[in-house]
Amino acid sequence: MKEDFRPQQDEIKERRDSISVKGGQKKQLKCDTHSVSGCVSQRACVYCGARVVLNPVTDAVHLVHGPIGCASYTWDIRGSLTSGSSLYRNSFSTDLQEEDIIFGGEKKLASAIDELVAKHNPKLVLVYSTCIVGVIGDDLDAVCKAAAARHGIEVIPVQSSGFIGNKAAGYRAACDVLLRLSLPQTANPLPKQQYTINYLGDFNLAGEAWMIKNYLAEIGIKINVVFTGDSSYETLQKASATSLNIIQCAGSMTILAEQMEKRFQIPYMNVSFLGMEDTAESLRKIAAFFENKEFNKNTERLIAREEAKVGHVIESAKQLFAGKKAAIYVGGGFKAISLIKQFREIGIDVVMVGTQTGRKDEYDTIGELVNEGTVVLDDANPSELEKFMTEKGAHLLVGGVKERPLAYKLGIAFIDHNHDRKHPLSGYTGAVNFAREVESTLCSPVWKYAKEGPHHG
Amino acid sequence: MLNHTPKEIQERKGGVINPAKTCQPIGAMYAALGIHNCLPHSHGSQGCCSYHRMHLTRHFRDPVMASTSSFTEGASVFGGGANVKASVRNVFSIYNPDVMAIHTTCLTETIGDDIPSFIADAEVPDGKTVIHANTPSYVGSHITGFSNMTKAMVGYLAEATDDSKKEQANVIPGFVNPGDMREMKRIMNLMEVPFIMFPDTSGVVDSPMTGEFSMFPKGGTTVEQLRDTGNSKITLALGEFASNDAAVLLDRKCKVPAKILKTPIGIKATDEFLMALRSTFAKEIPYELEEERGQLVDIITDTHFHFHGKKVAIFGDPDIVIALTEFVMSLGMVPVHVLTGTPGKSFERQVKAMLLAAGVEGNVKAAGDLFLLHQWLKNEPVDLLIGNTYGKYIARAEDIPLMRVGFPILDRSVHSYLPIVGYKGALRLIEMISNTLLERQDRDAEDEDFELVM
């Protein structure tokens, strides 16, 4: 029988500069580039980026203009909770057929919009373009404009043809749409509501945005709009009437924050509610912005109370996890940074950090945070992940859907930091959930069966 | 979403609401995984490959490996020739598979990439094989893609090297789980008929936990076996939609006669599968299989009153739905709504003929969606809904129990390991159906009607 093939990483010359080891050779990590053809990339496409950001707009018709697959694979996979409409959980597609490819899909798109508007009476229709729409040249703008006039509602094209870049380009397309929705409908700017902020880059997975809303309410600050968790057409329109934007998911939302600063003079700051350390720091930062002594007092009270509540859980987790090592492979760089700190908080060293779409400045921060010898890599493929996790002796991988079975096959514990997770990881509750999730996988009896049994003699 | 479906059914022209199908490339990727040491390759943007791996991973809960051409804007203007060349070079030097199986996407189909000439220009290492299938996403469904990649295996590899045919059968299992493929192989081993099954994803997407990651798990049909399919005495294509085209091509190319059968779900379809083997190879049915059939009939006798007259709706992939429809009718159930997302006139013809023969009046549709199925159910409710995970929205809205069968199942585990084909598979289906119905009966029973023995 053929020996199991062990991939030789150094054979992918193009990938050399995308991998670095802290304390090793001084070089700049290559990132934000195209993937190498023929690699098993874990990356997604422009449409994917746009869809994940926009899908939590709960009362919109999200219509995918393309063949059926793009709509099928994104049907209700986001886990974003809603307090209102659930229209966003349906899957609408023009299901383009061969004749549409030849003669154009504009007519079909127009009738799809008409039928959906008649059925669901939405205020907003988002029409996503897919790879093929970019190629056959359907005039999405014109079809949407005509439909908007016909029905007297917003029908907005999302320029998300898959091949025009990677997921980050999709974030930009989504931010374009969100900015357009944020523009005040009147000639005069909306009056700024005192002590309110927008919360950018939280998609209300497992109700996380609601948790943060409660924290801020206790301090005295109201959330004006969440982009885009549990948002709706009407809430998005009020976005300009606020004094501060805070950004959780920097990868997807920095562009929007920059635009809103330019147009509406709303300053922004990055925050992270992952782990106790980041949560406390972020709350303090937000409170300090308003220069209100009462807010600072409230914040300290909240932090003290919550830390007292969960501190012992984190402390005992720390004892339990002593000596364990984690590997990280997630979508964005900012999330990776938060995770490194969160692991440190529960006593776990990070030995490998990778992202799909991390930026240069984020990789710089990662480089500062991690220990000597930690492997940092951009746009990794499964064999690289395997190689470095094995080499570095990781006990745990944090990643998304495709990484889970990979870790399991290696006998490595896994926690999901993406679409498939079911509990909130934000704030103090999240810090506890995180520690418990790590425990439930790291301390499962299953791993010993993998290492014993007849085949191990 | 649960209340967004109106009862009144109107004709629609603008596409699909809540699809009961997905696109060709994922079917091609799944079929390619059924070749030993094969790396499926998606020729298009990264997103397609990523979505297909994600979806298959969720269903099988196993790593699904595939490479991508990583299309950019430039490639979509100038063509993907350079991407294919680079991909071939990188795939063999980095991952070293025996076979690279390229499938196209809607993007590369539309810009007209000529894959065979790209492959001819690429440097394929000695002893390695590159095959391809055209899988435009805007034609057919994932079942069409599975069929096209299976056909490509024949087109590229099958050879008739001998004048006479070997005493062996080709079996094309269709788009079924590895557990089903294992059961088909067990049956043929019991029949003592030598066979080549292709594709065969058992051992690939249900690989054992060893503490090591293997890029190419042990399973899959080897290239040698695929070559040898041209020398077989017969091809049994199980399921017309997924398996017919490869079988027909084998006949045309290598003169291997084809028999198109149903996916062997239920007594009748399993009987037909065994009879085809018996009549072709002059083999007796072994006692073990007779015994299993006898047990199955015994269990149906024991339980038939639970099923009789119960209304059922079935949706999913055409080959599975056709066979399931026949099976539930053999239990005395009444399939009043039968739907597949995959287009194809023969689906409606076959199902309607079965319903007509049984005197059942039902709704039947190919190229339908779950919105329509939901509307049907609002107009005529059923006792049981059978289909994949996406049926759960309808099941909840209409308070109908859902039995999960088919692809994809994203919210339950183990299903892909356990067969629904053969007599054993039929037993399992009966257990699933009766558990579902009886649990519902228990749940809904008033105290005075709550029974210990059912």
Image (cartoon, rainbow, N blue to C red):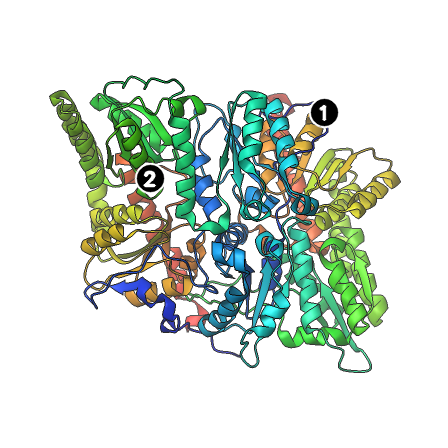
- Where residue B381 sits: x, y (%)? 70, 27
Picture layout, residue B132 above or below residue B266: below
- Where residue A86 sits: x, y (%)? 50, 27
Would you name the residue on which mark 1 appears? B379
Would you name the residue on which mark 2 appears? A255
Between residue A149 and residue B254, name the one nearer to us. A149
Judged left or right of residue B34, residue A313 is: left
- Please give the name of the residue rendered at 28% of the width and 32% of the height, measured from the top-left corner: A262
Q: Are marks 1 and 2 on the same chain?
A: no
Amino acid at circle 1? Asn
- Where residue B259 sits: x, y (%)? 82, 62
Write down the quadrant of residue A220 in the picture. top left
Q: How many marks?
A: 2
- Please give the name of the residue rendered at 55% of the width and 71% of the height, measured from the top-left corner: B37
Between marks 1 and 2, how big is the CA–CA gap?
48 Å
Judged left or right of residue A337, residue A170 is: right
Between residue B377 and residue B80, name the one nearer to us. B80
Residue B16 visible: no
Q: Quadrant of the C terminus of chain A?
A: bottom left
Which chain is disc 2 placed on?
Answer: A
Judged left or right of residue A41, residue B31 is: right
Tell me the SS state at disc 2: helix
Which chain is disc 1 placed on?
Answer: B
Tag nearer the camera, 1 or 2: 2
